[in-house]
Image: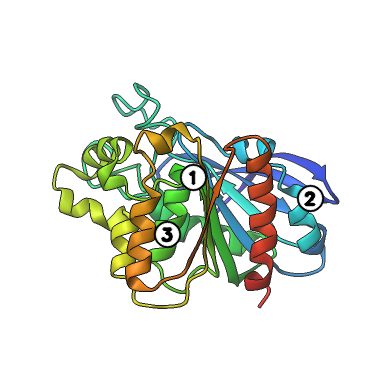
Amino acid sequence: MALKQLSSNKCFGGLQKVFEHDSVELKCKMKFAIYLPPKAETGKCPALYWLSGLTCTEQNFITKSGYHQAASEHGLVVIAPDTSPRGCNIKGEDESWDFGTGAGFYLDATEDPWKTNYRMYSYVTEELPQLINANFPVDPQRMSIFGHSMGGHGALICTLKNPGKYKSVSAFAPICNPVLCPWGKKAFSGYLGTDESKWKAYDATHLVKSYPGSQLDILIDQGKDDQFLSDGQLLPDNFIAACTEKKIPVVFRSQEVLLGDLFHKFCGLRIMGMVNVLTI
């Protein structure tokens, strides 16, 4: 599949690049960012996928997180895709910030008119990794995933639906139980239809209840004063309770602050925390 390089910038000895390609799954042009550390010049490196939250593009993470130094030092290739298809000309896709453009929710839609293009789950778990493995110096056996908010939801479900595919999963303020929160109900009813039993296939709290028992390494950071936490959008307690019942260990840290330094700290620590499992 042809890749078109849109930008390339030196950063901590490595290269931060952005590419565009024609997606088979999404049937539109898609962009993704990829950081190639200095070690990528001489050999294959572990791959770490980042999934962003609502309204984001591939640019948010690479410009705001401050992850490059840690990725450079530990020799990780970091890939950050867009959050949804773009320019599909679907009626209503640009009418709200939490549905449609910028809000793909990392699922495969089954309802018209979304099902043709809104297949972010298959894009993130299959098409994009195949594209990365074929064109960049990464080791496909050493792959992990993490994300924020909607992207934290995406990271959790991608891992739980694919036992053994990812070495570890981390999330920053993830949407943990979307079938019960306003964001999830709006997105799932639009993308998946009104049969709520079908929603559970993309809900981390329900998926973990039937997880087959392969080893998991889950880490979650959550700000105590997060407005979306108090509004009932994230529901981490439900996920923790389900993991406890299944005896699946989760490192959950409740933080005093949400944004700014914590986001930078989260990204850096999560990268460093994944180094051991990625390099095994």
Q: Is residue 126 left or right of residue 36?
A: left
Please name the residue that numbered disc 3 is placed on. Answer: 158
Residue 243 appears in which quarter of the rendering? Answer: bottom left
* Chain-order first, disc 1 or disc 3: 3
* Chain-order first, disc 1 or disc 2: 2
Q: Position of residue 128 (x, y in %)?
A: 51, 55
Q: Indicate whether 248 appears above or below 56.
A: below
Q: Is residue 79 left or right of residue 108?
A: right
Q: Nearer the viewer, residue 159 or 134?
A: 159
Amino acid on which the number 1 mark rests in the picture: Ala
Q: Nearer the viewer, residue 140 or 263?
A: 263
Q: Secondary structure at mark 3?
A: helix
Q: Nearer the viewer, residue 54 or 210?
A: 210
Q: Position of residue 269 (x, y in %)?
A: 68, 55
Q: Indicate whether 172 appears above or below 169.
A: above
Q: In which quadrant will I find the N terminus?
A: bottom right
Q: Position of residue 169 (x, y in %)?
A: 52, 61
- How far apart marks 3 and 2 lie (CA) works out to 26 Å
Q: Secondary structure at mark 2?
A: helix
Q: Looking at the rendered structure, which numbered label has been put on residue 173?
A: 1
Q: Secondary structure at mark 1?
A: loop
Q: Nearer the viewer, residue 110 or 176?
A: 176
Q: Nearer the viewer, mark 1 or mark 3?
A: 1
* Residue at 45% from the left image edge and 31% from the top image edge: 227
* Chain-order first, disc 3 or disc 2: 2
Q: Indicate whether 224 appears above or below 127.
A: above
Q: Looking at the rendered structure, which numbered label has been put on residue 69?
A: 2
